[in-house]
Image (cartoon, rainbow, N blue to C red):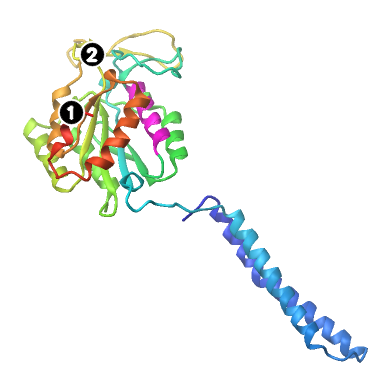
Amino acid sequence: MELSQPWALWLLILLPVSFFMMAASDRFIRQTQRVFLLPASPSRLWRCRSRMISGGLTLLSLIIALSGPQFWALLKDDPSHRLKLAVGIDVSKSMLAEDVLLDDPSTDPSAVVNRLNAASLFALRLFEEMDGGQASLFFFARNGIEVVAPTRDQGFLRYMVQHTRLAELTESGSDLKRAMATGAGLLGDHSQNVGAVILLSDGEDTENSLAELTSQAEQMNKDRLPVYTIGIGQPEEVYIPIRRPGATGIEGFYTDSTGRHLQTRLQAANLQMTASNSGGRYFALSDTEPRQLARSLLTLIPHSAELPIGGSRSRGL
């Protein structure tokens, strides 16, 4: 059970106050009866106690209603209600590349279509499609930034995705190993849940060797934390444009320390290896409409949890 307005529980302090006032009223009535020499009546005493009990219960019910209790009915044999996801969005500079096409009817035509916004859109659709499970959110580049701890409040997750200015958080470098570790840390103890990490990235890793990535992915497999990777971008190299807030056009392209223009492409091999060795699966965002991919993923993860570790999770839908 969760409370949407827990502050209302402070009103419980009114209960003893109300009982005191009702008891004082009862004493006043009895004193008045003695002054006028009215005989004490057992039925009158019971009526007074009934008023006190009913008044207290009414006030208690009102306070509980104001606190907004939410009861989650979990289906024992349905693993989809035990989902516990850690969703990570890559915020490295390469995610600013504009080599994606979004097949989403609700996309704002005036919005910049780059890898970062495509990742945000998919995360938004994923949280919209979740029903009853828990999810958390983090950003990563060279480091992992925990944004939202595991929660069933999908509305808050959607708010954070929609209103965080991710373009202002981008930094050079990307560490997929650190991203996996950040996701595992957010999930914590998932023995009673179906835990999984979802990484939305172009697959570039500037900090680790292939052997280090493989080792971390295999450790995730041992911990029963599969990593599902969503590849964003195209395999052909492109430049990374510079856009200033409020500007309508491109002001130039990012360069390295020698002045050469930086180029980036989708590193699908890194993401495929990470997914395969962790017991998850790789998807390319360009192949499927974001909402449909989100639905497929939310169907796949709970059922994959029932398969042997390292088993047939890599098969197609």
> Looking at the image, can residue 275 be seen?
no
x, y (%) of residue 87? 31, 36
Number of callouts: 2
123 magenta-colored: yes
State the residue in front, 172 or 67.
67
SS state under label 1? helix
The residue where tag 1 is placed is 271
Q: Which residue in the rendered view is the most extreme toward the front?
A: 77
Q: Quadrant of the C terminus?
A: top left
Tell me the mark number nearer the camera, choosing from 2 and 1.
1
Helix, strand or loop: magenta stretch: helix
Q: Which mark is residue 188?
A: none
The residue where tag 2 is placed is 255
State the residue in front, 231 or 81.
81
Q: Earlier in the sequence, mark 2 or mark 1?
A: 2
Picture residue at 61% right of the left edge, 54% below the top? 66
Which amino acid does the dot numbered 2 rest on? Thr
x, y (%) of residue 38? 90, 89
Instruction: Please state if 96 lies on the left or on the right of 46 as rendered.
Output: left
Q: Which residues are magenta?
A: 116-130
Q: CA distance from mark 2 to mark 1?
A: 25 Å
Q: Which residue in the rendered view is the most extreme toward the right?
A: 36
State the residue in front, 17 or 198.
198
x, y (%) of residue 130? 39, 38
Picture residue at 34% right of the left edge, 31% below the top? 295
Instruction: Please state if 18 lies on the left or on the right of 164 as rendered.
Output: right
Picture residue at 88% right of the left edge, 84% below the top? 32
Which amino acid does the dot numbered 1 rest on? Leu
Figure quadrant of residue 220:
top left
